[in-house]
């Protein structure tokens, strides 16, 4: 959806209730953006993620509840679940969203999942010729989530783009993934 290029814009008029307008004004002020920018962010999130979430029957869960569920699961079970999900879900999403599976679409998928689904804060760095990559994920869900992310990414990258990443560091709240592209 967003490619970094400046997109053409259009003016669209919509009718909203006064209560909704007041809420948008309040939230825009709290975020230190204009109401127009806030509406644009909301619409972008809908276009990039929410409309797909509706189709794929995703659920929303408070972080503390999710963390409690994670803590109750044994490490080997989390590993198996992550590998199973990593084998299936990323490829399905890539084909549905982008109609192709390659490194570019996988990295876009990972960025969207992190940005909108709260998996982690995400950053990717590549060398000049884009043959060496480092992905850093930082989260606040603890060691069990790191175990999940490590295995999910390993399996997802192998299955979708044929790359075997090296997990350089898998700490309590951080995952650092490195890989080489030929």
Image (cartoon, helix red, strand yellow):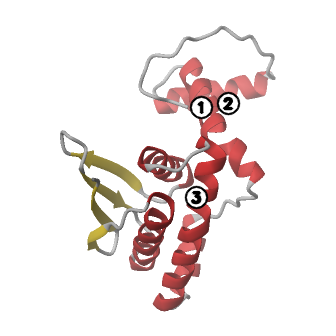
Asked whether 27 or 162 is in front, the reply is: 162
Work out whether mark 2 precedes mark 3 in sequence or the reverse, and give the earlier one.
2
Which quadrant would residue 51 be assigned to in this image? top right
Measured from the top left, where is residue 70 in percent x and y?
53, 80
Measured from the top left, where is residue 141 in percent x and y?
45, 70
Work out whether mark 1 precedes mark 2 in sequence or the reverse, and give the earlier one.
2
Note whether 60 is above or below 129 in the view shown: below
Residue furthest front as drawn: 182
Work out whether mark 1 precedes mark 3 in sequence or the reverse, and give the earlier one.
1
Q: Quick check: 135 left or right of 16? A: left
Note whether 16 is above or below 163 in the view shown: above
Note whether 86 is above or below 113 in the view shown: below
Give the SS element for disc 3.
Answer: helix
Query: Crowdedness of circle 2 by 10 Å Cα count: few (<14), some, many (20+)?
Result: few
The residue to which callout 3 is attached is: 91
Which quadrant would residue 179 be assigned to in this image? bottom left
Q: How many marks?
A: 3
Q: Quick check: 168 left or right of 97? A: left
Q: CA distance from mark 2 to mark 3?
A: 38 Å
Note whether 96 is above or below 174 in the view shown: above
The residue drawn where x is 58% and y is 71% is 85
Q: CA distance from mark 1 to mark 3?
A: 23 Å
Measured from the top left, where is residue 58 in percent x and y?
71, 59
Query: Crowdedness of circle 3 by 10 Å Cα count: few (<14), some, many (20+)?
Result: many
Q: CA distance from mark 1 to mark 2?
A: 19 Å
Asked whether 90 or 131 is in front, the reply is: 131
Which quadrant would residue 90 be assigned to in this image? bottom right
The residue drawn where x is 73% and y is 56% is 56
Q: Which mark is residue 23?
A: 2
Asked whether 18 or 144 is in front, the reply is: 144
Query: Crowdedness of circle 1 by 10 Å Cα count: few (<14), some, many (20+)?
Result: some
The residue to which callout 1 is attached is: 44
């Amino acid at each position: 959806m967003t490619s970094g290029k400046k997109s053409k814009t259009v003016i669209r008029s919509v009718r909203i209730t006064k209560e909704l307008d007041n809420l948008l004004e309040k939230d825009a002020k709290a975020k230190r953006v204009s109401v127009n920018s806030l509406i644009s962010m909301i619409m972008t999130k809908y276009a990039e993620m929410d409309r797909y979430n509706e189709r794929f029957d995703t659920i929303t869960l408070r972080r503390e509840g999710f963390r409690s569920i994670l803590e109750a699961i044994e490490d080997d079970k989390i590993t198996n679940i992550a590998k199973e999900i990593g084998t299936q879900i990323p490829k399905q999403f890539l084909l549905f969203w982008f109609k192709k599976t390659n490194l570019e679409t996988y990295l876009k998928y990972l960025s969207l999942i992190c940005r909108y689904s709260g998996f982690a804060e995400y950053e990717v760095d590549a060398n000049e010729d884009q043959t060496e990559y480092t992905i850093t994920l930082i989260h606040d869900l603890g060691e069990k989530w790191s175990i999940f992310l490590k295995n999910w990414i390993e399996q997802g990258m192998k299955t979708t783009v044929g790359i075997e990443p090296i997990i350089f560091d898998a700490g309590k709240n951080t995952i650092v993934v490195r890989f080489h592209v030929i």
